[in-house]
Amino acid sequence: MKIAPFMLAIIAGAAISSAGTPAVSAELTADVINRIRQLADRTDVVLRATVRIRKSATFSTEAVGHLVVARLDEVVSGPALYRAFVGRDITIQLRDPAAFPELSQHVFFATPWFFGETIGVVEEGSIPYRSEETPVADIAAEVTKGRALKADRELAAKIAKAQVVAAGKVVALRAGNLASLSEHDPVWSEADIEISETLKGTPGRKLTILFPASMDVMWHNVPKPALGQEAVWILNAGLRDVEKREQLGLAVPGSQLPGAELLRLRRLLPR
């Protein structure tokens, strides 16, 4: 059977959750909450499943030592397309197969392995599932919180490295004069930003920044300012034009945020 490789790009923007952010149940202990958040921090998929057959797989392979066939009972968090497999058998690659007897139920924190006529995931960690002690709604809420905390840490790190963080409106766009730095030409262009609020640095009332207009694989995720756009800009120095003048610019994903994120950014600024 031919199995299509799972493309991680599918994951972006496609995550679902079996619940919103309900209040945490008193049934979840502090240790369980910490474990859920730590595992959610580094995994893309959270599934409730029942182990059915040890040392087996839903596809043809002889390397089954760490594999189990499990019934997918519920998608706690993960790509929406996983829901089509609820109630069906999937393959899970386990770190320690001895810890998962047949008919045991667990919530698996995993990374995608393959996706095709069947699906497979790689377990990064798990918690035993008991409906009274580990309600799925509460697990989903803690997964959401864990990922939000991770996103805040990553954003705080970007703010710490940035020279300027400011809100403003794009009032002009033009081709830049920065020499190409690599074979993947970024097609550097310039944007004039009219500053409405400064959170870090001293940009003044108007600022010219560089950004890569290229849609090359190296640059397609880096923000592309649009005329009239209002946003919060997280800017780094280090880009130099042909006259060796240093300019601020956008060179990494996530360095442009909607204005609605201002409150969050203020909260994450160093005290």
Image (cartoon, rainbow, N blue to C red):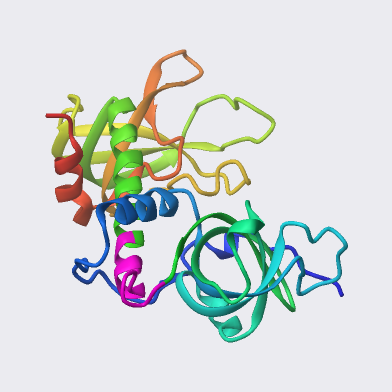
Please name the residue shown 21% across and 69% down the image. 25
Please name the residue shown 60% across and 41% down the image. 218
On the rendered structure, is 40 left or right of 32? right
In the rendered view, would you say 201 is above or below 142? above
Percent coordinates x, y for residue 144 in the rendering: 33, 61
Percent coordinates x, y for residue 185 in the rendering: 62, 35
On the rendered structure, is 164 left or right of 218? left
The residue range painted magenta reads 130-142
Q: Nearer the viewer, residue 236 or 149?
A: 149
Is 133 magenta? The answer is yes
Q: Quadrant of residue 200?
A: top left
Percent coordinates x, y for residue 202 in the rendering: 17, 24
Given the current orientation, which residue lies at the most extreme bottom position? Answer: 87
Q: Quadrant of residue 114?
A: bottom right
Please name the residue shown 79% across and 61% down the image. 64
Percent coordinates x, y for residue 152 in the rendering: 29, 45
